[in-house]
Image: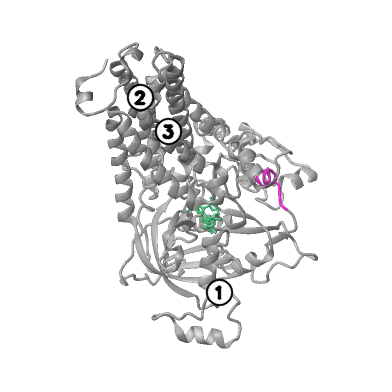
Amino acid sequence: MTTSSEHARGFIPVPTQLQIYDSYRIDPTWQTKFTIIWTSFLALSSLVSIPYIVHSYRVGRLFAGSSIRESDGSFTRRSTPRLAPRKQDTNPIRRSFVGRIHIGVQAMAQSLALWTLPMPSLTWWKGQVGDCCRRAYFTLGISQIVLVLGYMAAVVACFLVGAQLTQNPNRPGFIALSQLPVIILLSLKSPLPLPIFLPSLSYEHYNFLHRWTGRTLFLTVTVHGGMWINQFIKTNQYDQLNAAKSRRGILAYAFMCMVVITSLKPVRRKFYQVFWIAHVMFFTGFFAAISYHTPYSRPWIYPCVAIYAYDLLVRMFRYRIKDATLVPIDDTLTMIHIPDCDAGWLPTQHVLLRVLRGSGIFESHPFTITNAPSTPFSASPRGIMLYAKVSGDWTKKLHTMARDVESFEVGDDIEEKERFLANGTPTVGGLDHPGQRVQVMIDGPYGGLKIDLGEYENILLVGGGSGVTFILGGIEEALRVREKGRGPGKVDVAWVVKDMSTIKALSPTLCHLHALSRRLFLDLTYNLYLTNPPHPLPPVPSILPSTTTLSPYRPEVAQLVREALPLPTPLPGGVSLETGESTSLSGDEQNTRMPHHGLGAGHGGGLAVVACGPEGLVMEAKNAVAGLGVAERVRCGGIGFHGECYTL
Ligand SMILES: Cc1cc2nc3c(=O)[nH]c(=O)nc-3n(C[C@H](O)[C@H](O)[C@H](O)COP(=O)(O)OP(=O)(O)OC[C@H]3O[C@@H](n4cnc5c(N)ncnc54)[C@H](O)[C@@H]3O)c2cc1C
């Protein structure tokens, strides 16, 4: 049953003897059904996000981090900083009955969202590849798994219901085509003009869906191709295997296999650039081959091209080419200061950075913005501050370039460099290093904190290794909202780091943030943990506040969260703030309720937990929050969570 238009267009139809039902009429209706399913889900998620959008708009976050702006040198400081008076309670509704019910429901949903499956310990898999494989597919939370399974179920149902696959496996091919727009949509980096997905989500948060929808596509095309080949072999039609239509189909499948192989987590982690280039090349090849394999692909390819073009266009408008200074602040950390930026980002968002010098020009890498736009109160320098930890080739080259004070450039501060070289320590880094001027291209900002820190009275920031950049951004965000009269009274930082050198390198920044927090009457405490401690343990750098602690071990994140819980404490007279009943605590109870993180002194004003670092640490934090009792979370006034991993 072939159409004459197909012949006219030169496409090779399915052999007539193998056409059991009018596949070309019935199967497209299943494509429509599948499209209705996923677009309805998007519409629902848009509806669910309305309260979030309204809140973000009201507190000024909705568009605050949409595009970096500069003021062409006309940036002026107001002479007297004006601080908004701080509200006594960040969110008084949480004390009402309805508020508590709301927090309880949210807590249950939160557990579902955050819980991850325990990782199996496969001791016979050793080394990097084994570890990557072991971790690769066990990092999703329960809600993410439900979402993925729901999507897969919809796909499988659409290609199974009423289809006679053993006779005519065309349906999975049709359903594969209708999956293309959703896969491309989920690969977008640019924010969408509609509140599609919760608007706080950025590409790195829904990237897992892109990966799983891609895997589902692979499954679908495998069923389609595999069953046709089986059909040809069973009916002794070997000539069909060599027919042009089949050859084009096999070519498309080969491209798809290459996409899958080069996207495997070990490849992605070890050779990110190879993965990226292969992804673009093979997917383009897949589109070309598929459009010759069947004319029915064209209506699905056009929307994909349109979506991708939209992404490129929006990114083009957000690109900025800027001067930047690279400063090696220790042996492995490079500070990147981009001065000519005044607004349009939120701390904790990230930009894709491309350095327009050297061989790294062809690569762009994501780095977190650690500072808020300068205000009269912060009196910090204009611009964006990034920190890049040496991790692989590109970050190593960046660090080497930053150290290279010998290569003076026109426009560099030559006097400063000469003074530095005269000291005879050109290989040493540090904040007094004159730095290297380069031009950079920034794309963004993207992502950032999903929760509004202004809603919580207590904050726990847990960072591992280079995840400290997100923690610095988190402190800046807390100060920013506090300056506006909202937000936390207490911020606890737990930074787990390998050795002292990075702590020393970042001490001036930590000290500056602490000074600002004191001016805002914000209680900011640093608790530093060394995973590779020297013996004997060195003292805390003297520049850091006296409340800073240094411990020679990796802490249990669950313990940190538990200690930071702002459970309502009894009034000195022994009266509970919650119930008004007399409830004095024994000395022992007081000791366990009032450890040094969080002091247990909150009054149910809510706790925001932010974790950033290696996947293991973030998963630990997720499970720690998910494992708290619902009643406990209600008593604390609700717990917000944001987790960030620096790997895709
Ligand atoms: C949202 C986000 C924010 C980040 N913020 C910081 C930060 O503030 N400070 C910091 O030191 N590091 C940060 N990183 C990590 C940093 O981007 C990588 O360390 C860097 O790209 C490594 O490049 P490389 O070639 O030197 O090392 P490689 O050995 O090539 O890569 C090391 C790891 O980084 C990942 N990676 C490499 N290139 C990219 C890329 N273009 N996009 C995404 N991941 C990539 C790889 O998967 C690999 O796991 C962030 C990563 C992400 C995803």
- Please name whichever residue, 575 or 36, is drawn nearer the observer in this view of the structure: 36
Rendered location of residue 493, percent (x, y): 62, 55
Picture layout, residue 517 above or below residue 253: below
**What kind of element bears circle 3?**
helix
Looking at the image, residue 503 sits to the left or right of residue 364; the answer is right
Q: CA distance from mark 1 to mark 3?
A: 53 Å
Mark number for residue 253?
3
- Please name whichever residue, 24 or 152, is drawn nearer the observer in this view of the structure: 24
Q: Is residue 616 magenta?
A: no
Nearest-to-viewer mark from 2 and 3: 3
Q: CA distance from mark 2 to mark 3?
A: 14 Å
Question: What segment carries the magenta color?
Answer: 554-563
Q: Are the residues at dot 2 and dot 3 in contact (C-beta closer than 8 Å)?
A: no
> Sequence-wise, which precedes: disc 2 or disc 1?
2
- Please name whichever residue, 642 or 171, is drawn nearer the observer in this view of the structure: 171
State the residue at coordinates (46%, 63%). 360
Picture layout, residue 446 above or below residue 370: above
> Which amino acid does the dot numbered 2 rest on?
Phe
The quarter of the picture where residue 620 lies is top right
Residue 75 appears in view: yes
State the residue at coordinates (55%, 64%). 396
Secondary structure predominantly adopted by residues drawn in magenta: helix
Q: Are the residues at dot 2 and dot 1 in contact (C-beta closer than 8 Å)?
A: no
State the residue at coordinates (78%, 42%). 586
> Sequence-wise, which precedes: disc 1 or disc 3?
3
Return the residue at label 1. Answer: 431
